[in-house]
Amino acid sequence: PRTGAISPYGVNPQLAISALQDLEKSFANIEEATVAGANSASKSGASFILSGDGRFIMKSIRAEEFTVFADRLVEQIADHAGFEFAECTTEDPPLCWASHALAHTSLVVPLLAFSNPKNNEYWTAMPAVAQMRGFVTSRNVIDLSPWGVVRYFDTKPLPAKSNARSTFLRTLAQSGFHPKDPRTHPAQTLQWNNLNETLRKDVELLSVKTQGEESQVDYSLFFELYQPSRNVHAPGPGCISSVGCFRQDKGVCWVLCISIIDYFVTYGPMRKIESLFKGGKFNGYGSKVIEMLDCSFDQVMPVGAKSEQLERSKQNTLLRLQFPRGDFVDNQKVCAEYTDMACHDLQISHCDYDKNHIVYVAHNFGRRVDFCTSHWARRAFVVAQTREFRDLLLKSGPGTLPKMLMAASSPRSVC
């Protein structure tokens, strides 16, 4: 394995100069660098050092992670992101490396990795992604937060443990990101199509198996959520604007950006054993990541669905919803675990169905109406079917009614 210092930007001297000079400048005054708080070690045992200007992070990694990066990923990422073909001028450093990376990959790419094997020390120097994005957006190293305060969500797909996943999905459901909705602004759909394509290509890169090598697992989707003080119609690569950025009647403007972080872990023997005892959490990990993305951003009211307001007061907003039966609602079971995280606390009533439609009344769905109505359409159908079956059994005598059906007929809804 390689030792010393390596950089994926090294395939292009201009890009390497742009990146490494920027890194050097941020750490020039070492007294301003800080360890990341009193509890600076992550659950993996990694340590972090932040540059004084907050733009870069030094992170310790394990020897096997350094080997994976140095022997394989550094060249694959450079080729994947087209670093060799980036062109820098004397006017645009240090903007060159950052803008090129953001435009070509969602991977948070280290500027540098270096090792001291005698002391068992292995480190990467990475950009702080929100600050990097802010710099590229404002084109001003002093203005790293042009969209204001950012909220972070470090998430992983089911069944992996992820403390931020439920909070993120609940937040997403209320924020107006529905790029698959035919009623949304076309710019949002275009932004998502571009971002989704980039994410899928990056996941595909991490999922590639070659002779003697395994795919990468246990990486995270890292979401940044901004509420800018102005409408942002074109947030740039890696980001998507909410419908509120285009239509004031659809709520406030939000900007959501997505990156992939912590992707040096290989699906080797130890991870396979861990996966075996933890519900197969690393099996087909890339497919699980894509499924989480699809379930998060595909939620819409389908074509043909109808909504009628029954009541609107300070206490209640009741909507009667009619959904066409078919694959769209049936397929909600694929995403049920994700959508339940965002929608489980909502209430419905008056569930019914016929051969063409599913009908129910939604109680106080608020800003989650577009995200959660399909989830609850499937639930309403299941509840109505169960109730119908229960009634048939009751006609045959109460002794024939299994207790499990009684429990199934009493969900959190009031159907």
Image (cartoon, rainbow, N blue to C red):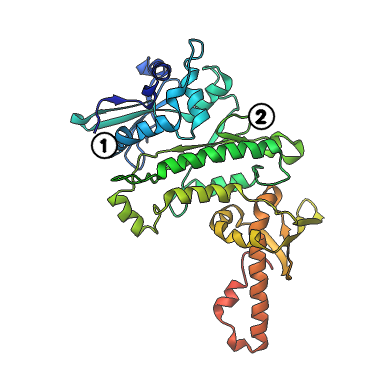
Work out whether 354 lies above or below 231: below
The residue located at (59%, 28%) in the rendering is 148
Q: What residue type is labelled 1?
A: Ala
Instruction: Write down the quadrant of residue 304 in the picture.
Output: bottom right
Residue pictured at 48% horizontal, 48% vertical = 289
Residue 302 on image: x %, y %: 70, 54
Mark 2 touches mark 1? (CB < 8 Å): no
- Residue under the image location 38 percent in, 25 percent down: 34
In the picture provided, is 74 more to the left or to the right than 143? left
Q: Quadrant of residue 1?
A: top left
- Viewer-proximal residue, 163 or 329? 329
- Which three-letter amino acid code belongs to the residue tagged 2? Val
Query: SS of the residue at dot 1?
Result: helix
Residue placed at 77% from the left, 50% from the top? 314
Q: Which mark is residue 232?
A: 2
Give the distance between the C-alpha atoms of the residues marked 2 and 1, in whole angstroms.
Answer: 42 Å
The answer, for residue 255, to whether it is visible in the render is no
Image quadrant holding the C terminus, namely: bottom right
**Observer-nearest of 127 and 38:** 127
The residue to which callout 1 is attached is: 63
Of residues 172 and 149, the one nearer the viewer is 172
Can you give x and y, in whole percent of width and height, for residue 199 in the image? Answer: 51, 40
Residue 48, x across and y down, in percent:
36, 31
User: Tag 1 or tag 2, which sits nearer the N-term?
Assistant: 1
User: Does residue 321 appear to the left or right of 334 in the view shown?
Assistant: right
Compared across the picture, whether 403 is left or right of 251 comes to left
Q: How crowded is mark 1: few (under 14 residues within 10 Å), some or many (20 or more)?
A: some
